[in-house]
Image: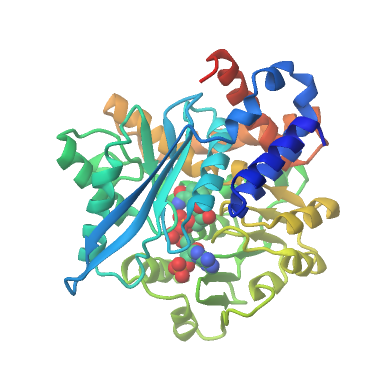
Amino acid sequence: MHTVTAGIIDHVRRQDPEQHEFHQAVTEFMTSVDKIVDDIPDIVFDKVLERLVEPERVVMFRVPWMDDDGTLQINRGYRVQMNSAIGPYKGGLRFHPSVNLSIMKFLAFEQVFKNSLTGLSMGGGKGGCDFDPKGKSDHEVMRFCQSYMTELSRHIGEDTDVPAGDIGVGGREIGYMFGQYKRLNNKFVGVLTGKGPAWGGSFIRPEATGYGLVYLAGAILEGAGMGFEGRTCLVSGSGNVAQYTVEKLNQLGAKVVTLSDSSGVLHDPAGIDDKKLAWVKALKNVRRGRISEYAKQFPGCTYLPHNGAETSNPLWSVPADYAFPCATQNEINELDAKHLLENKIKLVAEGANMPTSAAALDLFRDAGVLFAPAKAANAGGVAVSGLEMAQNSSRLQWTPKEVDAYLLKIMKNIYANISTAAETYSRKGDFVDGANIAGFLKVADAMVAQGYV
Ligand code: NDP
């Protein structure tokens, strides 16, 4: 490796030894941009890469809230404002017990390049809290969201930092946080995206990440002379991204045979058709139930609970043509990748952020599997968030058809850009290098132009 990129990887590991997810994200990125360091002298001279791995600002704060029993609970909140070279910070909020500074920093770091790939003016950020919405009443979630926003509101704004949803943050949580921001600031502005369509939200935002994932995967498949019709697909997770991935795959004639949640894995060999998907949406979004209930509702399926001691995830052992990990980071490990390859998987498209471990990614790349990295593949969500910001600024609301057409165009552009960057700087079809390099070049250009900030 180049001494500069190798030195940065070494630096982040030594500086924050416990931040494994952040190291993983930085290492993958540096391995890609390594190929262009010597082509652009400013990158080295202006220490662009060194500046990129240091967040512009990190806010970490106490979130006190009262549960239904009248007991005071304390959580830890975060917002990482990673890079604002090409626009206001933009990126989701994650509410999950696993949230820590390493996960926040890896997500914020990847967001910088993902947002750049959309072609819209958005910097990168990410936030969240180690709060677990599962099993909490609506009133508890409301009190928590109000407390979280009371502190966060000092650091965000429609031209400064515009958060959205992520794991554990959907329409309900965005509503409570928007209400509290408006109350504190006496301003109705587009400070959050993912709002309801009646109060400033964009149509197609809930669908955008899943639909965009399938649009990007479709462009890659088309480039390889393949398609979706009659193909069997694996989808993990059962939340926002998973649900709309299944919906779009069904529309395009594919058959999805798996879903999961943090408790276990569901396999439905007959396929999760639109009727079953509608049931899943009600289960997950309204009743907030567990995916195990699906197996009781629809005979002929198998449900395997996680026992916490597995070395591999049984979902990735199900034979299929294409895989769409849509749950969480590092959900495909080396053994899972081996199982997928044994079953001759043809495409892996990342709906979740960094769902593929470094060792698994190496196996996929060596095997020449079509691989759509998260930075490109799940950029549809933030792209439509960017369109929501544009609609809010102009006080207009576009139709679902208009927004969907924009989304499709953006995903096709991303495919064109990452393919060109792969061919120019790395090798044809290496979309990991393509996404990292194409996303980076625009940010680097802006950072050099704006001086040492
Ligand atoms: P949701 O909270 O709607 O759904 C998350 C799903 O993943 C749930 O089924 C959840 O199960 C499961 N899950 C979460 N953590 C784990 C875990 N540790 N092990 C196994 N399963 C787990 O989140 P989203 O669908 O919004 O997000 C999914 C992924 O997509 C994340 O990586 C997120 O960063 C990424 N993403 C989301 C975007 C968006 O627009 N929402 C945009 C771009 C990326 P359970 O219900 O049991 O918790």
- Pick the residue in front: 364 or 282: 364
Residue positioned 74% across, 19% down in the render: 40
Is the residue 70 above or below the residue 424 in the image? below
Residue drawn at the location 69% of the way across and 32% of the way down:
437
- Image spot of residue 420 (x, y percent): 74, 29
Residue in the picture at 18% in, 75% down: 69
Which residue is depicted at the point 65% across and 42% down? 26
Q: Is residue 68 visible?
A: yes
Which one is nearer the viewer's eye here, 184 or 200?
184
Relative to the observer, which residue lies in front, 223 or 104?
104
The image position of residue 270, as x and y in percent, is: 60, 76
Between residue 355 and residue 19, name the one nearer to us. Answer: 19
Q: Is residue 405 visible?
A: no
Colouring style: rainbow
* Quadrant in which residue 375 is drawn: top right
Answer with left or right where residue 257 lies relative to residue 98: right
